């Protein structure tokens, strides 16, 4: 009789490998917060053809925009990165290559996040500084058992507030990040820079001018993220 793998069970003439089917869903989670073209080796429990794992990919968020040099103006919020969530099945390939997108500074786009497994790329595009969200890609192909791709939310548009109130152009949100930073600029102040996004993939908020004509920088976006669950 062949030696059973760890986690296998025998029921009469039937051998069931729990490493493949499981019975309680994904038990472990690993976060990848930095890295470019990094080759990652799957955990030992996934080095079994047919085992399943879930990957979530979030692109980097854009920075908010600097205001015009006009009193009472707000810069637009940065767009959020796209999001891809997929369930994959191990196919005798025990590594994947990942890149985690960086956050965009004021007026700059983030960068994309991606995972390449078994020759297929799953990519979440970055948010853009004009407020446009990033587009998700790579979720419809023969190796995907289940997948969804979400375009990132747009940031709020720039504007002018003639009464110099404390309005703010928020950045776009993601399921794991917020572009809704603090309020900016008291009614008689010079205003304040935009707030940085928090979490992962969200866009920074735009700057806010008060009663002066000096531009205020937008806040930074939030970096991307890759999550492995198995």
Image: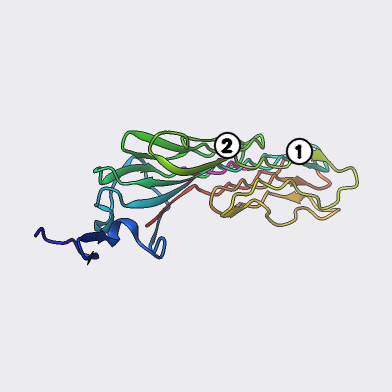
Q: Which residue is mark 1?
A: 158
Locate residue 31: give its quadrant. bottom left
Locate residue 107: give its quadrant. top right
Mark 2, Cα crowd under 10 Å, few <14 / some 14-19 / many 20+, is many
Q: What kind of secondary structure does the magenta stretch mostly adopt?
A: loop
- Farthest residue in the left direction? 1
* Residue at 28% in and 59% down: 19
Question: Image check: 121 left or right of 103?
Answer: left
Quadrant of the image containing the N terminus? bottom left
Q: Is residue 178 magenta?
A: no
What distance separates the C-alpha of mark 2 from that of mark 1? Answer: 19 Å
Mark 1, Cα crowd under 10 Å, few <14 / some 14-19 / many 20+, is many
Q: Is residue 216 above or below residue 138?
A: below
Q: Secondary structure at mark 1?
A: loop
Question: Image check: 120 left or right of 201?
Answer: left
Is residue 27 something one can see in this rendering? yes
* Residue at 68% in and 39% down: 66
Depth check, front residue: 26 or 84: 26
Depth check, front residue: 81 or 3: 3
Q: Where does the image place residue 209, in percent across and percent down from the top left? A: 77, 45
Question: Image check: 143 left or right of 11?
Answer: right
Q: Where does the image place residue 214, in percent across and percent down from the top left? A: 75, 41
- Provide the residue span drawn in magenta: 57-64
Q: Is residue 161 above or below residue 119?
A: below
- Which of disc 1 and disc 2 is earlier in sequence? 2
């Amino acid at each position: 009789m062949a030696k059973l793998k760890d986690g296998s069970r025998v029921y009469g003439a039937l051998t069931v490998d729990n490493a493949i089917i499981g019975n309680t869903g994904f038990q472990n989670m690993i976060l990848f917060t930095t890295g470019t073209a990094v080759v990652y080796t799957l955990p030992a429990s996934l080095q079994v053809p047919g085992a399943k794992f879930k990957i979530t990919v979030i692109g980097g968020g854009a920075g908010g925009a600097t205001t015009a040099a006009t009193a009472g103006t707000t810069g637009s919020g940065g767009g959020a990165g796209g999001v891809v969530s997929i369930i994959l099945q191990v196919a005798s390939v025990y590594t994947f290559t990942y890149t985690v997108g960086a956050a965009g500074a004021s007026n700059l786009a983030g960068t994309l996040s991606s995972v390449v497994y078994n020759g297929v790329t799953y990519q979440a595009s970055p948010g853009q500084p004009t407020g446009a969200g990033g587009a998700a890609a790579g979720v419809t192909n023969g190796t995907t058992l289940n997948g969804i791709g979400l375009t990132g939310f747009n940031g709020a548009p720039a504007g002018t507030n003639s009464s110099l109130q404390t309005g703010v152009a928020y950045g776009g949100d993601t399921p794991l990040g917020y572009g809704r930073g603090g309020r900016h600029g008291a009614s008689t102040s010079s205003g304040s820079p935009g707030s940085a996004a928090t979490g992962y993939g969200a866009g920074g908020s735009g700057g806010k001018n008060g009663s002066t004509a000096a531009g205020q920088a937008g806040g930074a976006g939030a970096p991307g993220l890759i999550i492995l669950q198995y």
